[in-house]
Each structure stands twice: as C-alpha cells, then as structure tokens.
Amino acid sequence: FLVTTLSSSLFSEEKKFDDYDKVEKVFQAYIKAVDKKNIDEMSKYFYYGGGPDRTIFHFGDNPPILVSELEELKQILTAWKESPNSSFLRTRLDKINIAPRNDWINERICTVDVTYSRLGRDDKFIVQKRSIYHFYRDKNSGIFGFFKKWKKWKIYMLVDTEVESTQS
C-alpha cells in the first residue's frame, strides 16, 4: 500500500521538461533586450541561416515574413523599434507557458506561449498582447560537441495571437 501511494503521488504531478528553466532564462533575457530596444542584443536570441533555415515572423493577418540573414532580421527589429508599437518602457509577463514540442536525437523544439502587458511611465498599462515563440536548438558537431553537447536555445518563429477575453 505504501509503495503504491508513494509512486502514484510522485508520478501524478505534471513535471517540467528538462530544459524548462534554460528556456525561461533565455526568454527573460530576450525580454530585457526588448525593453532596452537594443537591436543587436535582441538579434542574438533569434535563429537564422541560409537555405531552409529561416526565422518566421507572423504578425496578425499579414503574411508571414521569412528571414534568412542577420541584416534582414535587424531591418525588421529596427522598423519595430521606430514604430508606435514600441512606445512602451517595460514589459510585464502576465502568463507564461513553456512546453516541449519535439525532442529528437539531434534537435529540440519547444514553445513559449506568453501573455504580456506593455507598461509606460509610472507602470501605466498601455496594452496587453499574446505571442507564441517557437524555440529551437541542435547539437554541436565535431570537437565542440565533445565539450558542449547542445547549442543555445534560439527563437525560430514568432506568432502574434489575440488575447483571450476574460469578460463574459
């Protein structure tokens, strides 16, 4: 009876996936860069590359934007920085959910679903938004893989979604 009770209580709770804390730390650092509106710092958190390796931005009803080079990424981030949408001073994370999506031998993907508020002077509420960030990482190869198995988590897709209304 004791073994059954103990095992059911240990396995009944939903556990965080192994990299939950790492992804959360990377995401928090990214949000700090967003609040500073530091384009160079923000771009460090995105995955981009040539060929099929692209970052995808999907804002509202607009068609997705595919980015495969650093300069393209910086142009998008600079346009955002200069737009009225970046008139906030601070981001408050209201709700954050991090979940693994795929866990292959050489690649991992997870999703960060976040509801956040943009705040102005004296923490005055400006707007609440919701975005889904898709993170990716793969294994280091060659000699690097011997010393450090995995590369850092990077954002490869950002999708803005509607905030669900709590009013009935």
Image (spheres, rainbow, N blue to C red):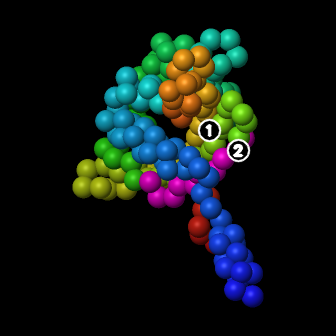
Closest to the camera, between mark 1 and mark 2, is 2
Q: Amino acid at mark 2?
A: Arg
Residues 5 and 103: in front is 5
Q: Which residues are magenta?
A: 93-102
Relative to 124, say whether 40 is above or below.
above
Which of the marked residues, 1 or 2, is nearer the chain's N terminus?
2
Relative to 97, say whether 51 is above or below.
above
Relative to 48, say whether 86 is above or below.
below
Relative to 58, say whether 74 is above or below.
above
Number of numbered callouts drawn: 2
For disc 2, the marked residue is 101
Q: Amino acid at mark 1?
A: His
Query: Quick check: is 92 in the magenta stretch?
Result: no
Q: Indicate the quadrant containing the N terminus: top left, top right, bottom left or bottom right.
A: bottom right
What residue is at 50 percent from the left and 27 percent from the top? 147
For disc 1, the marked residue is 134
Determine the CA span between mark 1 and mark 2: 9 Å
